[in-house]
Amino acid sequence: MQEVAIVGAAMVPFGRYPDQEAYQLGARAALDAMKDAGVGLNDIQIMSCGQLMATSGAGQRVLQQIGQTGIPVVNTANACATGSTALREGFMSIAAGMHDIALVVGQERMGTGLTYAGDESEGYVGSGTMPAVFAMAGMEHTSKYGTTIEQFAKVAVKAKKHAAGNPYAKYRDPVTLEEVLNSRMISYPNTQFMCCPNTDGAAALVLMSMEKARQYTTKPVRIAASVLTSDPWTERDLILVDVNTLTRNAAKEAYERAGIGPQDLSLVELHDCFATAELLHYDNLGLCGEGEAGRLIDDGETTIGGRIPVNASGGLLSKGHPLGATGVANVVEITWHLRGQAGARQVENAKVGLAHVIGIGSACTVHIMTN
């Protein structure tokens, strides 16, 4: 297999774009990523595009905006892992030796509403869809390990603190622990500030074989592992949706492929769709001992400047979660840190980064990048 490098990285600030379609946002990100890589459209040999809420031809619509050269286009839809699945398609095409330069785009336009149970009492008992799934998973962690509601809420406080340094994040104003705890209940223990907001956005990457990448840059970012897993059936599925196993499986394989362990990571961008999810994934990704996630957030170990910064971008909780764009955006963020281009939120001496996305009942991706 050929080594694969990231040479171009870009994203459109997440927010509301009522006057633009997803493919227009994707086109903007694609052009910026190609400019960053120093390539033109005629250099691109294959394109993969992730957009979950698309009828068909999402990638082709992007090319209709920026130029149609007849290259193969692969479109992906894989729940929240839609964009990162598109990334893996581009990665595999280069790793297999089929192509030397690939364009990857993730894009989405979302609705304006926040999914919640419908009234306050239903929120407290945990009814609903994804908010309920991660609420119940969080309460299971509380039951097993004593994780507190305040520890979950501290995730949202940290997210806003990090987002203040990220011009691509939608919500950048700081919040206090009290404000998080007192915001509207969505599905206990997740309040409104502990749930990711719906946003529009796009992100793009230009991938190359390492041999080709060295013709364009002296500092390519290497993709050391690209792993995709699906949800295996376990006995716990008879009681609760399993939000842990597919992440653990993906992380184990990714560490093995990259030849590293979690102790070697400089930073992590993980799928914090809800505050409870972030703490669960500290355990699932091996960032701490089993059940020690609450201690990590209490001790500030996952804050910028701590032992293992998590979601320096502000994460989905502050940046937003345009479904098809998220998986690509997480890797863009890691790439910027490994290049030393993350500005006010830069993690010092970043050498190895991990990006994680999970789509419940569907897919999980873990990508490990090194400089």
Image (tube, rainbow, N blue to C red):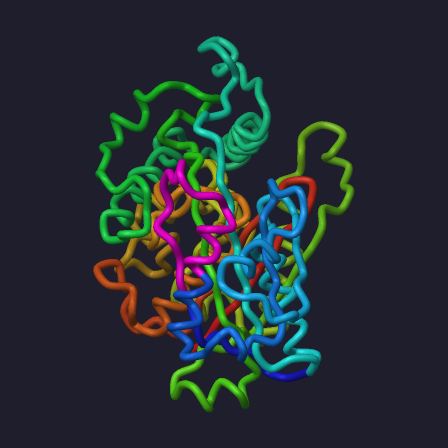
Q: Which of 71 and 78 is in front in this view?
A: 71
User: At 67% across and 71% down in the image, what residue appears?
Assistant: 92
**Going by the image, does 208 lie left or right of 167?**
right
**Going by the image, does 97 lie left or right of 312?**
right
Work out whether residue 279 can be spotted. Answer: no
Q: The magenta stretch spans which residues? A: 10-29
User: At 61% across and 62% down in the image, what residue appears?
Assistant: 48
Work out whether residue 90 can be spotted. Answer: yes
User: At 38% across and 52% down in the image, what residue appears?
Assistant: 311
Q: Which of 335 and 304 is in front in this view?
A: 335
* Image quarter in which the C terminus is found: bottom left
On the image, which quarter does residue 144 sit in? top right
**Going by the image, does 171 lie left or right of 27?**
left
> What percent of the width, then of the height, locates residue 247?
61, 51
> What percent of the width, then of the height, locates residue 123?
49, 16
Q: Is residue 41 above or below residue 52?
A: below
4 drawn magenta:
no
Q: In this view, does 79 lie above or below 122?
A: below
**Going by the image, does 88 lie left or right of 231?**
left
Q: In this view, does 283 lie above or below 123?
A: below
> What percent of the width, then of the height, locates residue 148?
40, 31
Q: Which of 189 and 274 is in front in this view?
A: 274
> What percent of the width, then of the height, locates residue 359?
61, 44
28 drawn magenta:
yes
